[in-house]
Amino acid sequence: MAKPILLTVDDDPEVLRAVERDLRRHYADRYRVLRADSGSAALQALEGLKTRNDAVSLLLADQRMPQMTGVEFISRAMVLYPDARRVLLTAYADTDAAIRAINQARIHHYLLKPWDPPEEQLYPVLDDLLDDWQASFRPPFEGVRVLGNRWSPRSHRVRDFLARQQVPYRWIDVETAGKDAEVRAMTAAAGGDASKLPLVQFAGGEPLADPSLAELAVLLGLKTRAETAFYDLLIVGGGPAGLAAGVYGASEGLRTVMVEREAPGGQAGLSSRIENYLGFPSGLSGSDLARRAVTQARRFGVEILAPQEAMGLRVEGPSKMVTLADGTEIGCKALVIATGVSYRKLEVPGMERLQGAGVYYGAAMTEGDSCRGEDIYIVGAANSAGQAAMYFSRYARRVVILARGASLSATMSQYLIDQIRNTENIHVETRSQVTEVHGAERLEALSILCSESGEIETVPATSLFIFIGAAPRTEWLAGVVERDERGFILSGPDLLHDGKRPNGWRLDRDPWLLETSVPGILVAGDVRHGSIKRVASGVGEGANAVQFVHQYLTTV
Ligand SMILES: Cc1cc2nc3c(=O)[nH]c(=O)nc-3n(C[C@H](O)[C@H](O)[C@H](O)COP(=O)(O)OP(=O)(O)OC[C@H]3O[C@@H](n4cnc5c(N)ncnc54)[C@H](O)[C@@H]3O)c2cc1C
């Protein structure tokens, strides 16, 4: 495949040459660098590239050009190459215009002239943007194929697993793909038995009939076994809090291992767009955040075991021993528990049968494309439900949010309420709750109770996404670490009852902030009693927990 293109535009020949030189120096081995001396010449070049089906990954345009400004050029170029990363080159005096352009032309970044030294001012920014572009770029497909049925919970589980592990795959729905050559070839190779769906085929391999997630993990080369038996720091949970603890722990010299039940990213990895995380003015998707954090953690040497679940904990003197789902045990000097929360179950008739067959917990972004042109329902009134509504509104004909309360304002951020109000195909039905889901093999209808009128209406539906609060899953810590009545982990001052330290606490000091009822076991993020359920709070607590780990390690 031809190298993707970096296109730079500037009317000043000297600046244009300088940009081109710096781009070539760093990127010539992976990208083709092209230049144009005006917006119109660049647009003409892009049209030619589009006709030849060439990939363009970066548009880097100077703002001040006489006939067409950088923002005008980028706005027009976006029509041809909507996925290319867009960067504006500005003088200091034009900073305000550049900030406005983040909204207008949805530029990804603005760079100030001069950008010397490029190693500090130019390449880190462009490397980051190009990594993002590469992550979403789909070259001619050579990866994993999944052949299945949209309404099969097993197919959904495999697709969800691959998506959360950030493995690009091609989904082929037997119902809509019909019997095209690709479907025939895959089913024939599996003995013609389509009841064995889903079939998963790796490049050059034979299709696997209905593989378990553990089998897929092995084939994908995911690491589930620890390299050694004992670590300075063990982190359970790979959401924002766990990942932050990993980054800080490993970067500060601790031999660190992380155990994650599903895929790193946690709940944040399920978010279609996080807009309130500091440093990302145009927002970022949860999977991007997860990918960046995992890269960062691995770079510092965190060993990530996923999928792998912590099932039990025992304390042996100063050592903490965690039992994993495969029966093995890992020991550590200090433990950070960052297991977050999971969605509560909606307990209404029909749910057991239809989960994964039209009824999903969380955003199930893998289903977006399948919902094209359909009416879909979302249960919940918090930010996660609002984000999902915005996400699905791009695919569905109509998105209905069912909220129990009288309005969304008590539970959802104003920016999301505003976005929902301005999106024509989203409808909010307050004082509404689902009382039953109907369908034999797949969701076909919902019964909805209106608490104001007391009436129950049954409406046809193909997809229901549920976001109803969350509960910690901390049973594996019972009898070792103190928890509140709902299972959230107590720490610091919350452990002092009438000024008394927790049972079994033998140290001559109170538990530190974020320290649990066992010295050297810290808690961070959503699973902590009294935590603020936000990405930034989790990240902050993960980082702080590591400070206490250092403090603790000086005492053992
Ligand atoms: C759809 C959605 C959208 C959201 N949007 C925003 C937003 O825009 N802004 C914002 O600030 N917040 C948002 N949030 C909230 C935010 O994602 C959470 O507050 C944050 O992820 C909490 O981080 P955490 O690390 O504490 O826990 P989690 O993200 O819940 O991660 C915990 C991890 O631990 C793993 N785990 C659990 N038990 C075990 C075990 N026994 N063994 C191994 N691993 C285990 C889980 O698989 C999970 O990956 C959103 C949440 C959702 C669901």
Image (cartoon, rainbow, N blue to C red):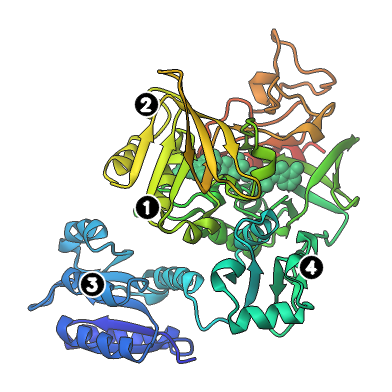
Ligand 1 lies in which image quarter? top right
Q: Is residue 454 left or right of residue 419?
A: right
Query: Mark 1: which secondary structure?
Result: loop
Estimate the spatial distance between the alpha carbons at disc 2 and disc 4, rounded to whole Å: 47 Å
Estimate the spatial distance between the alpha carbons at disc 1 and disc 4, rounded to whole Å: 39 Å
**Residue 74's disc number:** 3
Q: Is residue 418 left or right of residue 490?
A: left
Furthest residue toward top: 498
Estimate the spatial distance between the alpha carbons at disc 3 and disc 4, rounded to whole Å: 44 Å
Residue under the image location 65 percent in, 50 percent down: 441
**Residue 218's disc number:** 4
Whether label 2 touches label 1, CB < 8 Å: no
Provide the residue designation for mark 1: 397
Estimate the spatial distance between the alpha carbons at disc 3 and disc 2, rounded to whole Å: 39 Å
The disc, 2 or 4, on the residue closer to the chain's N-terminal end is 4
Q: Is residue 38 above or below residue 170?
A: below
Estimate the spatial distance between the alpha carbons at disc 2 and disc 1, rounded to whole Å: 23 Å
Q: Position of residue 47 (x, y in %)?
A: 25, 86
Q: Nearer the viewer, mark 1 or mark 4?
A: 1
Q: Position of residue 490 (x, y in %)?
A: 69, 25
**Residue 407's disc number:** 2
Q: Position of residue 76 (x, y in %)?
A: 21, 73
